[in-house]
Image (spheres, rainbow, N blue to C red):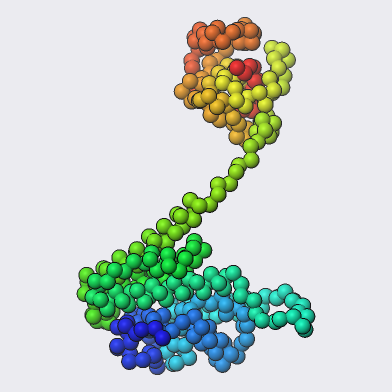
Amino acid sequence: MARILDANLAFSGGEPKFTTELTKVEMMRTLNWYSQNKNSKDAEKWAQDYFKKKLKVDVGDALKHATDTFGYVCRIVSNGGQLDAQNKKWFENEIQTLIEKSKKPKKKVVVKEEENTTPVVTIQDRIREKAHECIGELEGQLDDYILSDFKADAKPYAVMHTLNIKSVHVKMIVEFAKRRRNEFDEVMNTTDKELKEGYSNFTKTQLKKVVAWCDQIILDTQKIMGAAAENRKPRKRKQKSPEELVAKVKVLDKFEELKLESVATKSIIGAMQLWVYNTKNKKLGCYHAEDAGGFSVKGSSLTNYSESKSVMKTLRKPEVVLPQVLKAGKVALRNVLTDLTTKESALTGRLNSDIILVRVV
């Protein structure tokens, strides 16, 4: 049986029972008592009893989806406690959700008479059981920490490491740490005299130490998640062919007015220089690759080009300049745009059906 060290037990003397509406403080202290002194099996049993005896409804396996808190609240209500408006609305919503889940059709499983009909423990059940085991050990560590007047060496990671906790378990452990942290943090910052009195056996320094311990649990679970990510084998990305990369690129194949034909779009991939001519606004542009990897394409746009070096200018005499681009060597190409007196503007990388791919280098 779990050790009873929580201040709530000292005030209640046993399982809390109420005949009136619970205040926020009473609700917090009562749920804390149940989480300290009872377990998931108790919570599930109380939830089953509530549905069968109070509501006269059989929800079957749907209760496996219920939280421990729901089971504890079932117990509180069964013992005569009355919920405030906010908790009552939550409780009713949880009941309705579980009833709806129980109505979903189940898959029929044909079992031969000679076969073993022992219930199968699922992977989710094992994960939940392992996480609850860790949470129980952490609660014990906190108990020892409090008993030692906060002098004991309380390291949550040591508990998790000993139990071989993996990334699949950490979600429930983090929820537990956040719930406990919020509880003590609220006590530390509240102006509610009744709430402060309920935790008067803790000094403010001690409350801070409990909050810090909860924070350490969250940090330690991140270590576990990080280690899992480092050990995970990186997924090998499938290399796309040039044809696949340019599949969505649409350019003008021919421009009869100047007797121009576009080069093959797949020749863009890996090239270091691309000359384009916009037939709509009569602008000649030259793209320069950003690095030795050359150009690539994403969708219908050119990628890995230098935004500072890639420019375009309007052609007053395209019938004169464009043949020069087609015939010029690499050195002569450097001066084609420089010799033009029209205004320079930046290229955007977008390729469309108004553009002729004049030349790739």
Please name the residue shown 31% across and 69% down the image: 154
Foreground: 248 or 131?
131
Using the rendered image of the protein, determine whether residue 281 is visible from the camera's viewpoint: no
User: What residue occupies the far front of the structure in this picture?
Assistant: 162
Q: Is residue 81 left or right of residue 333?
A: left
Residue 259 in percent (x, y) is at 71, 12
Foreground: 144 or 172?
144
Q: Is residue 314 left or right of residue 209?
A: right
Please name the residue shown 64% across and 17% down the image: 358
Q: Is residue 329 left or right of residue 151?
A: right
Q: How many discs appear?
A: 0
Q: Is residue 164 above or below residue 90?
A: above
Residue 359 in percent (x, y) is at 63, 16
Q: Is residue 218 above or below residue 311?
A: below
Image-quadrant location for residue 263: top right
Quarter that holds the C terminus: top right
Q: Is residue 71 left or right of residue 187?
A: right
Image-quadrant location for residue 31: bottom left
Please name the residue shown 51% across and 87% down the image: 46
Residue 261 in percent (x, y) is at 71, 17
Foreground: 12 or 209?
209
Q: Is residue 124 above or below residue 95?
A: above
Please name the residue shown 39% across and 61% down the image: 220
Using the rendered image of the protein, determine whether residue 232 is visible from the camera's viewpoint: yes
Image-quadrant location for residue 273: top right
